[in-house]
Image (tube, rainbow, N blue to C red):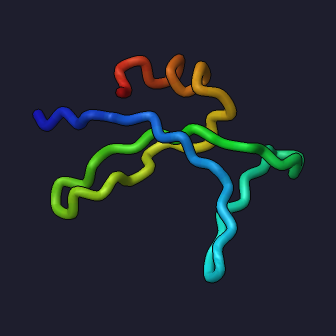
């Protein structure tokens, strides 16, 4: 069995010259940051999100207690 390590990733908004990340709750209220769960892609080594949109670190930890 292949056991993957999961990571809690803090994602904040970003606005650059060519791209941006906007964060908001379901009602459209802007959020400063979100927490997502990621695992490492074995082939590329890149972290990929597998679960999204926790508004607090505590929510993410409660949902994924074994995540780093």
Q: Residue furthest bottom?
A: 18
Q: Residue furthest left?
A: 1
Image-quadrant location for residue 64:
top left
Quadrant of the snapshot with the C terminus? top left
Quadrant of the snapshot with the N terminus? top left
Please report the residue visible at 72 percent of the width from the left and 53 percent of the height from the top. Answer: 23
Please report the residue visible at 65 percent of the width from the left and 61 percent of the height from the top. Answer: 14
Horizontally, is 59 left or right of 67 in the view? right
Total numbered labels placed on residues in the image:
0
Please report the residue visible at 22 percent of the width from the left and 57 percent of the height from the top. Answer: 45
Please state which of residues 5 and 13 is positioned toward the viewer in this rendering: 13
Q: Is residue 47 above or below residue 6?
A: below
Q: Where residue 13 sits in the image (x, y, percent)?
A: 67, 55
Please state which of residues 27 and 29 is positioned toward the viewer in this rendering: 29
Horizontally, is 26 left or right of 54 in the view? right
Q: Is residue 14 above or below residue 17?
A: above
Q: Where residue 10 sits in the image (x, y, percent)?
A: 54, 40
Please report the residue visible at 58 percent of the width from the left and 26 percent of the height from the top. Answer: 57
Q: Where residue 44 sits in the image (x, y, percent)?
A: 21, 63
């Amino acid at each position: 069995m292949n056991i993957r390590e999961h990571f809690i990733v803090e994602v904040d908004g970003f606005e650059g010259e060519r791209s941006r990340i906007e964060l908001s709750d379901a009602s459209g209220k802007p959020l400063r940051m979100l927490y997502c769960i990621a695992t490492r892609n074995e082939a590329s080594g890149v972290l990929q999100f597998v679960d999204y949109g926790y508004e607090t670190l505590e929510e993410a930890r409660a949902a994924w207690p074994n995540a780093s």
